[in-house]
Image (cartoon, rainbow, N blue to C red):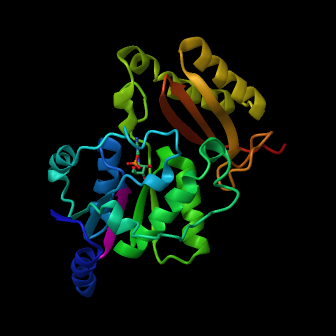
Amino acid sequence: MRVIKTITQLRKELDKARAQGQKIGFVPTMGYFHEGHLSLMRRAKKECDICVVSIYVNPKQFGPKEDLRTYPRDIKRDRAMIRKENVDILFIPSDNVVYPNRYLTYIDVEKISNTLCGKYRPGHFKGVATVVAKLLNMVAPDVMYLGQKDAQQVAVLSKMVADLDFPVNIRVVLTAREKDGLAMSSRNIFLTPQERAQAPVLYRALKYAVGRIQAGERSAPKIISTIRKIITQQSSGRIQYVACVDAGTLEPVGVLKHRVLIALAVFFNRTRLIDNVIVPIKSARKI
Ligand code: AMP
């Protein structure tokens, strides 16, 4: 594995690979790896010749009151964790490399950046879209791998890639979970033992909702209130939002139809956890 810190060096390495006809897979991350990140890398390695992983904690996607300063970082640990994953290039640019002096250009994927998490994290997806556009220009991969865990990020980046004609395919990898169902996240280390014990309630509530839908429930407000009730009754989590939206457009739905994304964000003290499921809705059988 080569560790690269500059764009020039990165392009030099990747130009060589491209000249040999090698397919490049790219996994953008903020580091502090867990099995979710590794599953993206394994998929990239399986489907491409070269796997490039970036670690960059992007200041532009954190709000002024968010956890940029305390976001977990440990490059040594990350390097050790991926030693067995056959990653070819680990790209670790510094702030100066990504945002040189007098940086002025931003990408705003309108509308879908401002619902769900975006409603509570103004500017977050503008920061995400901007940094990923830049990383795509630096790496120029054939395929970019993203996790379903961040469903809105997938929607925003897919729209950006389509709207701006980035020549890259996006593959979405299922959410990796702990044995008790908690979605893996770099932020899980901030949970106290009691909060960690309660946190699986998020996925339990989502799964219960899926069961209700499979049993015929089609009312979004009912599904939302069921989920809220389970989380409130079974944990100390403070709900930021629970929403049922169309999985493609992220528009809220009243009656569940087509493919629905049920997404939520819940605070355990200061730790904000997100999770989601996508539910294909069977239409009523015609008699
Ligand atoms: P992050 O380092 O949190 O920015 O995540 C980097 C990539 O890993 C993003 O595409 C995330 O959606 C993905 N990811 C994070 N957690 C998980 C998970 N539990 N399962 C699958 N992918 C994940």
Quadrant of the rendered image containing residue 48: bottom left
Residue at screen point 74% across, 30% down: 217
Quarter of the image that includes the C terminus:
top right
Q: Is residue 102 left or right of residue 84?
A: right
Q: Which residue sits furthest front?
A: 102
Q: Is residue 132 above or below residue 14?
A: above
Quarter of the image that includes the N terminus:
bottom left
Expressed as whole percent of the image width and height from the top left, the position of residue 163 reads: 61, 73
Expressed as whole percent of the image width and height from the top left, the position of residue 149 reads: 48, 44
Give yes or no for residue 24 being in the magenta stretch.
yes
Q: Is residue 248 left or right of residue 191?
A: right
Residue interval drawn in magenta = 23-28
Q: Nearer the viewer, residue 179 or 1?
A: 1
Expressed as whole percent of the image width and height from the top left, the position of residue 40 reads: 35, 53
Q: Is residue 100 above or below residue 174?
A: below
Q: Is residue 177 left or right of residue 283?
A: left
Quadrant of the rendered image containing residue 6: bottom left
Expressed as whole percent of the image width and height from the top left, the position of residue 222 reads: 75, 26
